[in-house]
Amino acid sequence: MSLAAFATALLLLLLTPGPTNTLLAVAGASRGVRRSLPLMAAEIAGYFTTVLPLVIFAGPFIADAPLFATAVKLCSSAWVLSLAVRLWTNSPADREVCIRMQCVYWTTVTNPKALIIGLALIPAGTPQIAAYLAVLAATILVVAALWLSFGAAVIGAIHRRHPALIGRLAATCLLLFAAGLAGRAVGLV
């Protein structure tokens, strides 16, 4: 896959709503873009934590071990479900605790998008790995900024009037993502 095709596919993949983007949008709504910018570093670190080993070592192993991929999906589902429960049960004041660097990092590490990037989008054994990783980092920054801005602009207005509603909506989205992941892992979806 060429770098241009990779960048296009990556942009479309990362723009898709998912667990990490949900957390970023809620962070943008509750704290604003500027105070949420450090979360972008956690997202980059999370993607690189998963993508690098996949590109360098695990591609052939996972192709021969489908149970491993199923286990990863189930773990991802469990993590996203735990985030949904925390967002649903926490008060708006406590929600800041749910959307910390560690939560964004671990949500991204377990995000199935990282598996797609590491196993399908970045060509295995490419001599241009540094270029692909640079495009990955730049695209993550752009998309994260868009989700933070969306959260601040669109969701923030609702958050100011109905602070509990945003946490409940985000929890519902995360619950749906967790159910979809689990369903795909066991072949129901």
Image: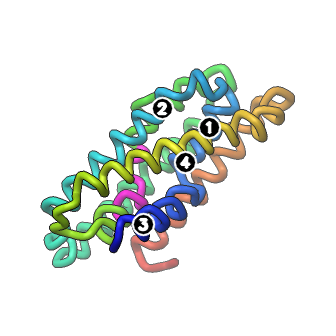
Magenta-colored span: 107-115
- Tell me if 121 is positioned left or right of 176 in this view: left
Q: Position of residue 154 (x, y in %)?
A: 78, 40
Q: Badge 1: how crowded within 10 Å, few (<14), some, or many (20+)?
A: many
Which dot, 2 or 4, sits closer to the camera?
Answer: 4
Residue 150 appears in view? yes
Which residue in the protein does label 3 denote?
Answer: 4
Q: Secondary structure at mark 1?
A: helix
Instruction: Kindly report the distance in space between the C-alpha atoms of the residues bearing marks 1 and 2.
Output: 9 Å
Q: Residues under labels 1 and 4: Cα distance?
A: 9 Å
Residue behind mark 4: 143
Which of the two labelled residues, at mark 2 and mark 4, occupies the earlier sequence position? 2
For marks 3 and 4 on the same chain, the one whose residue lies earlier in the sequence: 3
Q: Nearer the viewer, mark 3 or mark 4?
A: 3
**Circles 3 and 4: CB atoms closer than 8 Å:** no
Mark on residue 148? 1
Marks 2 and 1: in contact by CB < 8 Å?
yes
Tell me the residue at 19%/66% (across/down): 126
Residue 120 located within the stretch drawn in magenta: no
Residue under label 2, please give it.
39
Q: In the rendered view, how is the structure colored? A: rainbow
